[in-house]
Image (tube, rainbow, N blue to C red):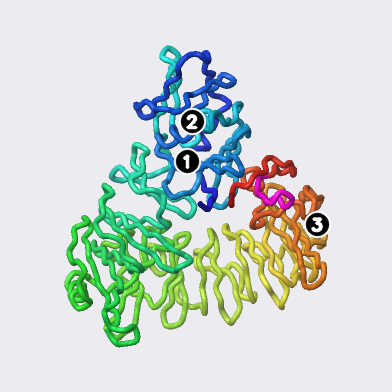
Amino acid sequence: MKHRWKKAVSGIVAAALMIPCMPMIHITAQEEIRVLVAGEQVEFDQPPVLRNDRVLVPLRAVGEALGCEVHWYENTQSIGIGRNGNGLDDVVLKVGYPRVLSLTDNNVVEKVTEIDQPPIVENDRTLVPVRALAEAVGAEVRWEEATQTVTVTPWNVNPDLIFQDGIAILKQGRYSSVQKEDGTMLLPGQYDRIVRYGDMLVADVVSYVAKWWQTTVYDLDGNVLMAEKTDAKLLYVFGYLSVSWTERTDKAWWEEGSSVTRHTVLDKTGKTVLENVDDETYQSFRREYFLLNVVETDTAGSSQSGLVRATVSKENGETRTIFMNEDCTEVAILHEFEKVWPFENGYAPFCERGRWGYIDTKGNVVIQPQYEEARAFSETVAPVKSGGVWGFVGKDGLEKVAPQYEEFYIAEDGTEMTVKKDGKWGLIDAQGITKIPFQFDTPFWFQEDMAVMTDGEKYGYIGRSGEWVIPAQFDGCRPFSGGVAVVSRTTDSGDENITEQYALIDKTGQLITEFGKYYIYGLRGVTNGYINVGFLEYDSSGILGVDGTEIECHQLIWP
């Protein structure tokens, strides 16, 4: 099975893996150790053992009793533990390795926790510290001295989740699941998207290779209301969920009528109103029950404004855009816009008769349509185009920086902008005061007060003065993260055999690692104090400290 690293349960592992602080377990090797998971005794074909005052238990028996998937990778002697039922690992341990790795979905080590007793192999069984295993996946562990019993209680519930009707949708990287308040999973983490509409859960599985998706509708107890439909189009408006899909007929694919569109409609309680009906029946239902002929909704920006954009089809074939409330049961802003973008920071650009202005979340026009183009507001200003060039306007409608720039990049807080004028790039503040003169041929932006820049041939870094801090000397650079950046150089050994090698540098430009020793996946830089790398000399993967120290090397991604 192809193995990927996946992020551990948010908020759980970070808190639970304080393993070095756990209380000592005092037993003798002759005493029988019992392990209870959720009140049930776990049976072992290899009994628990005592090492360094730590109870070690057979991994698979306890892991599966906790409802986890357990994966053993023989060639690396590594153990993967996945909690969400999607075949991916949240936590990794390794035989003889005194650390627990908590992983993100992007192959990045999120946390490394030291343990004083590593996993071992005994009688062809992998044994792991029971507390390290349980707490790594969010369970509570208690030792009862009198009965020599380890009691494991699943699960710690993520305090950041917002529960409604006893359930919450949990998004971890690419995958989504539905968790109940007791910490158990209603729907496993195998779906690319889960959305709640009324009393229904709509779950999608996407195949990015075959380019299809399958949609299943569940009730709030996890029962199937509508079985899988492939490439279905969904629309939830005015309290009804419409599911539309295409079916092949017995005619040849090139003949007219070779496919037909079918529809199922459920109301917000999950009751089926129409089931597998033709287009004529469905359109008749829409005309009777839909206040407007809404054909599409877009939730972009809805988390900020509580408003959802909806496209309305008119009888003359034109389309207009309205705003509905967050659950799309009613129209929130009555005006039908020619064009309108999502709300950001309380305002949305809209277009009428070819000119752009801004509205607030009540639908009030706060800046009259007057610009050739308009973009979303940052926290303070928005880019507007007039006379073919860009400037910046404030939320009060007043011009902050007169239109004069050919292109721009704006900071999220709106305090500074990288802008292009007369073919050169420079930096200005929100009042239009020049901070870095217009002298560069390429755009730039700052991260940790350093910006990647090129002299036309090589790459280096400039500071906020616009002067070179690290001279251009590399064939490629990435932004700084945690005081470390990834740089590359290209070597040509002839016959078009070009090799790119990577190294790590600090903010003085000094090499932390040698070129070519490591291949740094995706040029990610530093994540939570660790750098994810590939070890070329070992043909494997692992992690580094920010000082270049090799922490671990073993092949986890493609065993």
Q: Which residues are magenta?
A: 534-543
Residue type at the position of mark 1? Val
Residue type at the position of mark 2? Pro
Residue 555 versus residue 547: which sits nearer the camera?
A: 555
Residue at position x 28%, y 45% in the image = 165
- Check residue 282 for magenta coloring: no
- Check residue 536 for magenta coloring: yes
Residue 28 versus residue 188: which sits nearer the camera?
A: 28
Label 2, residues with CA under 10 Å away: few <14, some 14-19, many ≥20: many
Element assignment for label 2? strand
Horizontal side of 279 relative to 484 (left or right) equals left
Q: Which residue is mark 1?
A: 70
Query: Mark 3, mark 1: which one is toward the viewer?
Result: 1
Residue 459 rendering spot, x and y as whole percentages: 77, 64
Q: Which residue is mark 2?
A: 58
Residue 2 rendering spot, x and y as whole percentages: 53, 53
Residue 2 versus residue 349: which sits nearer the camera?
A: 2
Q: Of helix, strand and loop, which mostly describes the magenta segment?
A: strand
Specify which label sits upstream in the sequence, 3 or 1: 1
